[in-house]
Every structure is written in C-alpha cells, then in structure tokens.
C-alpha cells in the first residue's frame, strides 16, 4: 500500500496515471474519507512543507497540485448531489488563498453524506461570497486556508457569514488550523475542524470536536 510521501513523490514527478492507479487500489479497501484523511491530505501537507522550506520550486508545487486535483476529481462521487437534497453547503477559500485541494476533499465528503454542495473554489472576494450566500442560503459555509497568516482573513469571513440573516453555520479548516494556535477564532462562533475525521463525525452525528478545537456553533 502506497504511503503519503511516496504519493507526494508521484505528484511531484507528474505521474498522474500511476498515482491514480495506487489511489484506486487504496479505495478497493478503504473509504473515500480515509483516502483524503490518511493519504491525500498528508501527501499535500508534505508538499506544502517542502515548498515552505524551499526544497521544491513553485512550478513543482503547481504540478503536484494539478495532479492531486486530477485524482480527486477522478474519484469524486457526485451521485448524491443530483437528488435535490435539502441540506446545502457552500465551500470556498478567502481572497488571497490559492490552495483548493482541501476544499475539493471537503466538498466530496459533504456529497458522500447527502449534502447539496456549491463549490466556489479558492480566492473568492468577501463581497462576492456574501452575495452568493444571500442568494443560495446555505445551511453551512465551509472555509479553508493553508497558511497561518490567512487566519485573520478567515476570522473576518466567518464573522461576516455568521451575521447574515439566514445564520449559516460556519466551519473553518485547512493546514493553517493544524499548525497554529486558533484561539483568535474562538470568539467568532464558528467551528474549527482539525481534520476530515472530525468533519465526518459532525456530519454523521452533529457532535462537535471533543478536543482543543471544540468551538460551539
């Protein structure tokens, strides 16, 4: 069974079909959530660390992201999204945030649990995000950022969404949450999700995380 660092190497080498072959083999024995949580996310975190330490170039990081995007799209399940379900989630990254693989993983996990998903992508300016939320009125807005210095922007977005008349729940996640102190987000009323396992628990049971990331919505 392939390991995250080995998968990261395939992404960096541009080996899209070889990466997809390993991922399909993984899915023969594991769920899509396990794929995201235990293989894809760690692989991309590793690539992010390499980039931050100047061990790979921007071009290398872009190639790896494109390959990861390809395999996520290849295994995404959109069947539930076509059934006109009542629960709705809007998934996006704030302005200035270009990372989007985590957003796609979150979107796929919501679909797997029967939610209608509006994937808005990364780098969405707040006025446009609020306009879309006012029009579509999602039950949940999911935000993500990879870099720690984006956390103040996430807080601004969370406060803006929570102030909407429709009062959507706001979830915040991404690599920035895993590598930083998130106390500054506690006052927003959003729920900080450390990983996809916590998100799945919330989707299945409505239970909030039972650790340091526990924030009431």
Image (cartoon, rainbow, N blue to C red):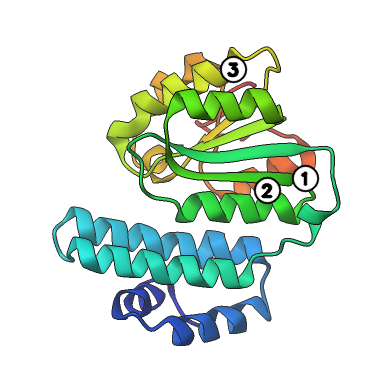
Q: What numbered label is drawn on residue 200?
A: 2
Residue 73 is left or right of residue 50, and the answer is right
Q: How many residues crowd around disc 1 within 10 Å: few (fewer than 14), some, or many (20 or more)?
A: few
Q: CA distance from mark 2 to mark 3?
A: 22 Å
Instruction: Tell me which label, 2 or 3, sits earlier in the chain.
Output: 3
- Above or below residue 159? Residue 104 is below
Residue 48 is left or right of residue 15, and the answer is left
Instruction: Tell me which label, 3 or 1, sits earlier in the chain.
Output: 3
Quadrant of the image containing the C terminus? top right
Q: Nearer the viewer, mark 3 or mark 1?
A: 3
**Mark 2–mark 1 contact, CB under 8 Å?**
yes
Q: CA distance from mark 2 to mark 1?
A: 6 Å
- Outermost residue toward the left in this view: 54
Report which residue position mark 1 lands on.
Answer: 204
Classify residue 185 by image quadrant: top left
Report which residue position mark 3 lands on.
Answer: 162
Q: x, y (%) of residue 10? A: 36, 80
Q: CA distance from mark 3 to mark 1?
A: 23 Å
Count of numbered marks: 3
- Above or below residue 198? Residue 46 is below
Q: Residue at x 72, y 61 (%)?
A: 78
Q: x, y (%) of residue 91? A: 57, 41
């Amino acid at each position: 069974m392939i390991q995250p660092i080995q998968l990261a190497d395939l992404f960096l080498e541009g080996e899209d079909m070889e990466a997809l072959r390993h991922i399909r083999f993984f899915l023969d024995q594991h769920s899509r959530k396990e794929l995201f949580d235990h293989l894809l996310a760690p692989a991309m975190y590793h690539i992010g660390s390499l980039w931050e330490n100047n061990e790979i170039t921007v071009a290398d990081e872009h190639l790896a992201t494109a390959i990861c995007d390809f395999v996520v799209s290849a295994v995404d399940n959109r069947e539930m999204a076509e059934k006109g379900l009542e629960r709705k989630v809007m998934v996006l990254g704030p302005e200035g945030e270009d990372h989007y693989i985590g957003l796609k993983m979150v979107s796929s996990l919501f679909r797997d649990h029967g939610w209608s998903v509006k994937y808005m992508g990364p780098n969405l300016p707040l006025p446009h995000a609020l306009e879309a939320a006012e029009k579509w009125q999602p039950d949940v807005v999911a935000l993500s950022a990879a870099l720690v210095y984006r956390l103040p922007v996430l807080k601004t977005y969370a406060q803006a969404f929570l102030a909407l008349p429709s009062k959507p729940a706001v979830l915040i996640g991404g690599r920035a949450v895993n590598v930083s102190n998130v106390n500054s987000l506690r006052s927003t009323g959003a729920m900080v999700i450390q990983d996809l396992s916590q998100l799945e628990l919330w989707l299945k049971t409505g239970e909030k995380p039972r650790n340091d990331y526990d924030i009431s919505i």
